[in-house]
Image (spheres, helix red, strand yellow):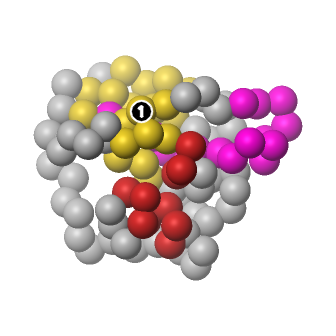
Amino acid sequence: MKITWYGHSCFLVETKGGSVVFDPYSPGSVPGLTLPALTADLVLCSHGHGDHSYAQGVALSGRQPGFGLQRSPAFTTIGAGSCGAKTGFA
C-alpha cells in the first residue's frame, strides 16, 4: 500500500486492487497548495466544503477497484452530492 499526502486533508491511497483520492481540494481553497493532476478509481469526500470536495479535479480511471468497496448504500453530508455524482455513488 502506498499513501501520498497532498496537503490539508487530501490523500491518494494506492493498493494492488485500486486507488482512492480522499478529500481533494479546489483551486484557491487551501492557501499555498495546488492539487496536482490526479487519476484514481474512486474519489471520496468527507463533506461538501471546497477544501474537501473537488471531485472534478480528479480524473477517474474507469477501472472497477478490486478491494471490496460496496457501492451502496452511500451517505453524504448536505452539499456533498456533487462529489457523489462524480464517484457514481449519487
User: Above or below — where is 48 with respect to 6?
Assistant: below
Q: Is residue 27 left or right of residue 76?
A: right
Residue at 23% over, 63% down: 71
Q: Is residue 57 left or right of residue 71?
A: right
Residue at 62% over, 65% down: 48
Q: Is residue 73 magenta?
A: no
Which structural element holds mark 1? strand
Which residue matches tag 1?
39
Q: Amino acid at mark 1?
A: Thr
Front position in the image: 89 or 47: 89
Residue 74 place in picture, x, y as percent: 33, 71
Residue at 30% over, 23% down: 1
Q: Is residue 28 magenta?
A: yes
Q: Is residue 65 left or right of residue 19?
A: left
Q: Main secondary structure of the magenta part?
A: loop
Residue 28: quarter of image:
top right
Front position in the image: 39 or 30: 39
Q: Quadrant of the C terminus?
A: bottom left
Which residues are drawn in magenta? Answer: 19-34
Disc 1: CA contacts within 10 A as few (<14), some (14-19) or many (>=20): some
User: Is residue 67 in view?
Assistant: no
User: Is residue 89 in view?
Assistant: yes
Residue at 58% over, 39% down: 10
Residue 27 place in picture, x, y as percent: 74, 42
